[in-house]
Amino acid sequence: MAVVKSVKIDGENIHIFNSAIYIFESHSGYTLELDLVVSEVTERKYKKEQNLIIEIELENGRLIDSIMHVKTLSGGLPQLNLFCDLEEIDEFDDLDRVSESSSWFPNVEEGITLAEIRKVEMPNENISLKLNLPIDQVEWLKKQKKASLNEMLQEFISEYLKKQE
């Protein structure tokens, strides 16, 4: 079984938490498949792209460069499924083969949690809040800069969560 050492997408190294590279055999032909567990930030960045330039380095030193299509898999951990059709599979003898009728299929989520992924790269999200506060607090909030409000709320929520534990 080939082991992925590193992956570059459009020339940029990405952090991978787990991966599987294999040949998928179907009635319509062969595809090179690369399943990656990545951070939520990476998944969001690439999931809407149709084609990406992928550079894969295997642990045995082999390099595979290809233009690949992107699928995202819903549920579970953030993942990218990259694939491209293959005309010739002879040069890929070192990769596992999976077919439509296979009982074995790579499980790249095994042994990884979302909490572990977020320790490496925590995504930020915008949120709008509707609050009912005394007017003097509202006036004070309106005078604050967005960056300082974000920092203040992050600190407050972190402290509040610590007290809850």
Image: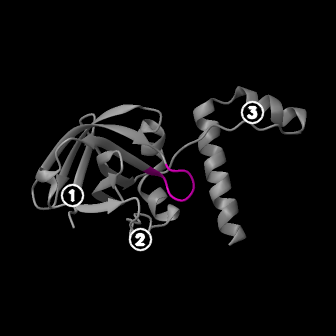
- Residue 5 badge: 1
Q: What residue type is labelled 3?
A: Leu
Residue indicated by mark 2: 103
Q: What residue type is labelled 2?
A: Ser
Q: Mark 3–mark 1 contact, CB under 8 Å?
A: no
- Image quarter where the N terminus lies is bottom left
Q: Give the range drawn in magenta.
A: 73-79
- Percent across and percent down for residue 79 are 44, 52
Left or right: where 9 falls relative to 164: left
* Separation (CA) of disc 3 from disc 1: 48 Å
Kindly state the secondary structure of the residue where label 2 is placed.
loop
- Percent across and percent down for residue 98 are 32, 61
Who comes first in sequence, dot 3 or dot 1? 1
Left or right: where 92 falls relative to 54: left
- Residue 141 badge: 3
Who comes first in sequence, dot 3 or dot 2? 2
Main SS type for the magenta part?
loop
Q: Can residue 25 be seen in this view?
A: yes
* Separation (CA) of disc 1 from disc 2: 26 Å
Foreground of the two, 148 or 16 = 16
Q: Which residue is drawn at 31% across and 54% down?
A: 25
- Percent across and percent down for residue 130 are 82, 37
* Separation (CA) of disc 3 from disc 2: 58 Å
Q: What residue type is labelled 1?
A: Lys
Relative to 149, residue 77 above or below: below
Q: How many labels does the image show?
A: 3
Q: Quadrant of residue 164?
A: bottom right
Q: Which residue is drawn at 65% across and 67% down?
A: 162
Left or right: where 46 falls relative to 134: left
Q: Which residue is drawn at 46% across and 38% down?
A: 47
